[in-house]
Image (cartoon, rainbow, N blue to C red):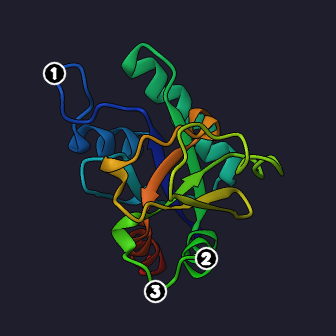
Amino acid sequence: MPAYVVLLRALNLMGTRGLPMAELKSICEDLGFQSVRTWIASGNVVLQSRKSESTVKSTLESALTQRMGRPVGVMVRTAPEIAAVLAANPFLGLHNSNVMAIFLDAPPAADAHLNLKNQTNEQLRLGLREIYIYYPDGQGQSRLIIPALKHGTARNINTIAKLAQMSAEL
């Protein structure tokens, strides 16, 4: 059965109006997904399903929108796709916590790395359905505005490595 990595976008998972990870796991199980595991309180889920990637996405988006009372973005990658994202990291050898991948539903626009605001020393590279960013001074110090992030969700390489490992174990 295929393994998937699910990445939630812009969802408060700990606040009073948020969604605790235990509840997120329960929602996934109630939807019929199997081997559901969450990773850190930032909207990362690994699961198995016989459903297609697009059906996993739409099923979760619908359930989470109903639960939260507002749209919740969901990005889905298969276990081989998440492993490929990790392997394609163009900033290999740099501090992993300073390297992010923005996950998108579709390939990034060819000029996505050009339409930026407040760029200083940050570096961007385009992937298949991702945009890789290296923050030499750390993301917290950066004022970079990436318009493509409005439609995606970002994870650092350390998180991606863990999710790749977890999904490969299923």
Q: Residue furthest right?
A: 110
As drawn, is 138 to the left or to the right of 151? left
Looking at the picture, how far across and down is residue 55, in whole percent?
Answer: 67, 44
C-alpha span from label 2 to label 3? 9 Å
Residue at mark 1: 16
Dots 2, 3 in contact, CB < 8 A: no
Q: Callout 2 environment at 10 Å: few (<14), some (14 to 19), or many (20+)? A: some
Question: Taking 13 as reference, is 159 above or below it?
Answer: below
Closest to the observer, 168 or 41: 41
Q: Residue furthest front?
A: 120
Looking at the picture, how far across and down is residue 51, in whole percent?
Answer: 65, 53
Residue at mark 2: 90
Looking at the picture, how far across and down is residue 44, in whole percent?
Answer: 38, 53
Let me know if residue 33 appears in the view: no
Q: Callout 3 environment at 10 Å: few (<14), some (14 to 19), or many (20+)? A: few
C-alpha span from label 1 to label 2? 38 Å
Q: Quadrant of the C terminus?
A: bottom left
Query: What is the number of the mark on residue 93?
Result: 3
**Label located before the other in sequence (3 or 1):** 1
Q: Residue at 63% across / 57% down in the picture?
A: 131
Q: Residue at 51% across / 44% down in the picture?
A: 153
Q: Amino acid at mark 1?
A: Thr
Q: Nearer the viewer, mark 1 or mark 2?
A: 2
Identify the secondary structure beneath mark 2.
loop
Identify the secondary structure beneath mark 1.
loop
**Label located before the other in sequence (1 or 2):** 1
As drawn, is 57 to the left or to the right of 128? left
Q: Residue at 16% across / 21% down in the picture?
A: 16
Q: Residue at 60% across / 42% down in the picture?
A: 57
